[in-house]
Image (cartoon, coloured by chain):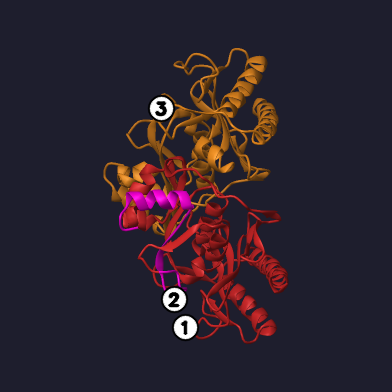
Chain colours: A red, B orange
Amino acid sequence: MMEEKLVSKVKDWIAVATALIKERLEEPLDVERKSNYSDLVTNVDKEVESFFVQQIRKEFPTDKILGEEGMGGEPVTDFSGRVWVIDPIDGTLNFVKQQENFCIMIGIYEDGKPVLGFIYEVMKKELIWGGPQVGVFINDTEINQISTDSLKDSLVNVNTMMFLQNDCHTQEIGLTSLGVRMCGCAGIGFKDTLLGRHHVYISYLQPWDYGAGLVLAETLGFVTIGLDNNKLDLKKRVPVLVTTPIIYQELQETYEEL
Amino acid sequence: MMEEKLVSKVKDWIAVATALIKERLEEPLDVERKSNYSDLVTNVDKEVESFFVQQIRKEFPTDKILGEEGMGGEPVTDFSGRVWVIDPIDGTLNFVKQQENFCIMIGIYEDGKPVLGFIYEVMKKELIWGGPQVGVFINDTEINQISTDSLKDSLVNVNTMMFLQNDCHTQEIGLTSLGVRMCGCAGIGFKDTLLGRHHVYISYLQPWDYGAGLVLAETLGFVTIGLDNNKLDLKKRVPVLVTTPIIYQELQETYEEL
């Protein structure tokens, strides 16, 4: 099956990228700023993305690549055919300051439809991967249940600025829940929601921040939506909600505009 | 040396407690609520504290024990002699909902003076331990440096309710920093500050939440103070700040009342 070959290839590439990241962590990082003071990029982000781009170009020369660091060339505007959505190091701030709590993320789409997603929390050695044709696994264990806890019995993970400004009711949602967590890494936000460690994740996300997670969340039956009433079309930065169907229903009943 | 024997004994007890916790995680937990809906205690918190109390009573029958779950008997009011401050499972909410991100914490004081501290993040297998006579170690590696980063180049870890209400300037501190993290576990808050993963930790803490961390932080030269202008005397719940000397100086220069 096509998906199984792809899974095997991507897992191999992630293993190589992991070795590269760990090797680079032995040396001082070359850190630059992008859009603002806390928006960092390192030599390692670029090198890892370049590695993935090279592998994809070699194996699948007609595929399109949408990567955070733009190493795949021109921005992708046409999502026909196969598109790879890559965040080489998601949680770069954590990578630089903590040397942990960061992920490699790869999403694969075919004509805009989710095919495969991979989120690897590198230092924790936790890979969540899969898609509609193969199921979703955490390392080698298949995931096949979604929590039925209500919001009041759940932890939630939210973006700091959204919480501070009470965007999308994040303060009320946080106060209704058992507790609020903030981790600074979309990959962990998605992965830990899908693993049931918290049941709500809300953050402003770029396409490469949600490309992989969207495949996995939809496959498992989680609700993943843009809170600006836009579908997640991989084209722009939007506030994203990931949650269980039961909590989504609670939120819809509580907040008219969700 | 007295401390070295104590270290060895406590490490052995932590290993036994860890095995017990992991065994209990195979079964459904018995969860009760304490002061409010999100203040949980489980059969495992009580069982682990009982285990430590039994070991201490057997080895050091005249020592006093201040434990979160009160398994050591009457509350400690007199801090003369040797006092053990124990949080059997710090981050019980994480323990129940995530089965990770929780710590065993033990602080040892002699006539109110710090002697030894142990914070063990159980599922991550990370033990930070030590005291003024032996130094501070993360597992087997001695820690002997404190970051000189300023607040604007640091991550900070703050309590959700304090951040929401801007208690102790937590919103301004968060916005000045590179980013805010929330983890729901005082042990991780202390440990990750001492390891340089973030450089500020602010939370309302009970004596058993800061008993172990205070020993370690003071030994390493971190600033650890009560933000209500009270010294940390192990007698009550206070808002606690843990940070590097450099950031403490910055905070003092910025906020008159700190």
- Asked which secondary structure carries label 1, the reply is loop
Q: Is label 3 or label 2 in front?
A: 2
Q: Is label 3 or label 1 in front?
A: 1
| Residue B143 in the image, given as x and y percentages of width and height | 60, 46
Quadrant of the rendered image containing residue A228: bottom left
| Residue B130 in the image, given as x and y percentages of width and height | 60, 36
Q: Does residue B151 appear left or right of residue B32 in this picture?
A: left
> Which residue is nearer to you in this view: B255 or A68?
A68
Per the rendered image, the range of residues in magenta is: A231-258
**Callout 2: chain:** A
Mark 1 residue crowding within 10 angstroms, few (<14) / some (14–19) / many (20+):
few
Residue A158 vs A234, above or below: the answer is: above
Residue A138 vs B89, above or below: the answer is: below
Tell me, yes or no, whether the two marked residues, 1 and 2, touch with CB atoms within 8 Å. yes
Question: Same chain for marks 3 and 1?
Answer: no
Residue A57 vs A258, above or below: the answer is: below
Label 1 and label 2: CA atoms lie apart by: 7 Å
Quadrant of the rendered image containing residue A104: bottom right
- Asked which secondary structure carries label 2, the reply is loop
Q: Provide the residue designation for mark 3.
A: B35
